[in-house]
Amino acid sequence: MKKKIGLLILIILPLLLVFGLYFYSPTIELKESNTLKVIDREEEFNYEEYINSLKVKYNNTDVIGIIRIPNVLEEPLVQTDNNDYYLHYDVYKKENINGASFLDYRTNIKESKKLLIYGHSNIEGTLPFVKITGYNDKDFMDKNPYIYLIDSNGSRKYEVFSSYIENKDFDYVNLNSFGGLTYKEHLEKLRNKSFVKKEIELEEESKVLILQTCSFDQGIVSNRYQIVVAKEVK
């Protein structure tokens, strides 16, 4: 009888071990402290390893990060040597009319003071970047004030302060010259265009993130763009 019990234990223990390992996989999330952690074990998250894993996942070395708006969207971010390729190819580098979310080739994700990110929208409202049009509404902006940019160096937090539709003045894409304005004045100009007025301190040293997608506010395809501007906050 004892031998049978011992044999039964030897059979059950490995099964319990496998069961435990299968269901105890660490959960990764962006904590309120703006630090990604493996929360089950409270280990510091390895950002470089994470981004490298995305390069493997999508089989694309152009993957440089993740853009994340909690409860709104989370998209891999790519960058190449021009602003045309990813208008027509997805993150897998497969031809796709929906393109991919990409960083302007003129900017450096780690160093540039002004980062420009582009993504497609559609009239049907099914693409992720369509959701940023919500920032034209005060309630939406109040509920979703922050945008997170995750790259191999870590996670950065940006607070949205301007959201508007543009069809003629495209100087928001300028990186060094702002029509005779200082950089701070340029940022103030972008804030003044916003449908929602939000007080946030803007300075010459402020780092900003600008999102651009097509606007279908008139229900037609037109040369109008939804713009969302956010300032990096500590």
Image (cartoon, grey):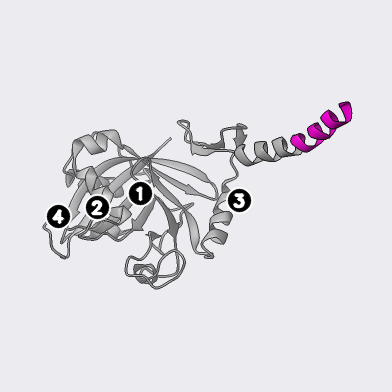
- Residue 181 seen: no
Q: Earlier in the sequence, mark 1 or mark 2?
A: 1
According to the picture, the residue beneath numbered tag 4 turns out to be 217
Which residue matches tag 2?
227
Which residue appears at 17% of the width and 60% of the height?
Answer: 224
Of labels 1 and 4, earlier in sequence is: 1
Q: Residue at x 79, y 32 (%)?
A: 9
Mark 3 or mark 2, earlier in chain: 3
Q: Amino acid at mark 4?
A: Asp
Residue 129 seen in this snapshot: yes
Depth check, mark 1 against mark 4: the one in front is 4
| Quadrant where the image shows the C terminus | top left
- Report the magenta residues as a range: 1-13
Q: Nearer the viewer, residue 40 or 37?
A: 40
| Residue at disc 4, secondary structure | loop
The spot of residue 190 in percent (x, y) is 22, 48
Image height of 143 relative to 226, above or below: above
Task: Tell whether position 12 is magenta.
Answer: yes
Q: Residues within 10 Å of mark 2 (few under 14, many from 20)?
A: many
Which numbered marker is on residue 49? 3
- Say if mark 1 contacts mark 3, CB within 8 Å: no
Q: Quadrant of residue 159?
A: top left
* Residue placed furthest toward the left: 218
Q: CA–CA distance between discs 1 and 2?
A: 10 Å
Q: Residue furthest front?
A: 1
- Residue picked out by circle 1: 209
Between 57 and 156, the one lying in front of the other is 57
